[in-house]
Structure formats: C-alpha cells, structure tokens
Image (cartoon, rainbow, N blue to C red):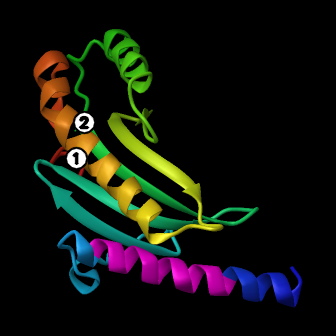
Amino acid sequence: MTSLFANQRESNLSSTVQLVEAALAEIGHPAPKSRVKDATALHAWEIPKGSAVTRVVLLNRAEFTHIRVCAIVMTLDPKVDRPALHQHLLELNGELCGAAFATEGDEVLLLGERSTLDLDRSEVLELIRRVTTYADDHDDVLVARFGGSIGVSTAAT
C-alpha cells in the first residue's frame, strides 16, 4: 500500500468515526456510552431502539473502509419453519429500501452497508435510522408469526 493511499484511508477512517459519533449523539446515543469492543471491526458502537439492539461497525474492506449497521432481529429455535421464514424474509427484502434481511447461523439479521468513500453525515444518520427502525418494526412481528426469540437468545450469550 502506498503511503498516500494509507494516509487517505487513515484520514477517511478518522472523519468517519467523527461522523458516526456525531450522528449517534444527535439521536441520543453519546459515543462514550455506545462504544463497544468488536474484534472484527476497526470501531464499533451499539445502540438500542425498542426491543432491537443495533451495532454500527467500521470494517476494513480491500477497496475502502465500510460502515455496516446490523441488528439481530431474532434468534431461531428448532420449532421455527425455516423455509417459510426464509421465503417471507426474501419477500420483505423486496419492500425494504437500503437494508436487507440476512441469516447467520440461528440469527436473523437486518443490515445495511456501504463504502465510507464520500460519506456524509446525512447518509450515516439515514443508514442508522433505517436499520434501527426496520429492526424494531419487524422483530416482534416475525417472532409472533414464526417463533424463536427477539434479538439475541440468552442461551446464545
């Protein structure tokens, strides 16, 4: 990596951290209280909204740093009809804007991700608001319809 490119990435990372922390403060989640450790991320924050908890992380990607906003919407148990749930999640994805449902093991996630290149404050706010709102809107409904538990299962923590 050339020195110039390394400096550009470092400068971008520093400004992105400032953007994220300003956005979080604006929506009532000051940075010192929301910062968390995440071994997979350059920086991470965690914020609650209703029954959903959302994690904002900055990830080192090959082309550029990315911001990822991800909420664990529900944790599945053996009784959940996974094919029916997956079909429903795909249908919901067609209605969402700027975010999508995904699965990771027994967890159903709602996430949005983009490069931090040319990122501005309004885009950070929109990404956080979109994912937190969608997650809080859908978690109770999905668990009521398909089973499982809201967010991270206590057995999984």
Which amino acid does the dot numbered 1 rest on? Val
Q: Quick check: can you spot residue 62? A: yes
Which amino acid does the dot numbered 2 rest on? Thr
**Residue located at (74% from left, 83% from top):** 8
Residue 78 rendering spot, x and y as whole percentages: 24, 21
**Residue located at (42% from left, 64% from top):** 122
Pointer 1: what residue? 152
Residue 84 rendering spot, x and y as whole percentages: 33, 9
**Residue located at (29% from left, 56% from top):** 54
Magenta-drawn stretch contains 129? no
Q: Does label 2 or label 1 sit earlier along the sequence?
A: 2
Q: In which quadrant of the rendered view does residue 89 lie? A: top left
Q: Nearer the viewer, residue 114 or 147?
A: 114
Q: Which mark is residue 17?
A: none
Please give left or right for residue 57 compared with residue 5 in the image: left
- The Cα–Cα distance between marks 2 and 1, rounded to whole angstroms, is 6 Å
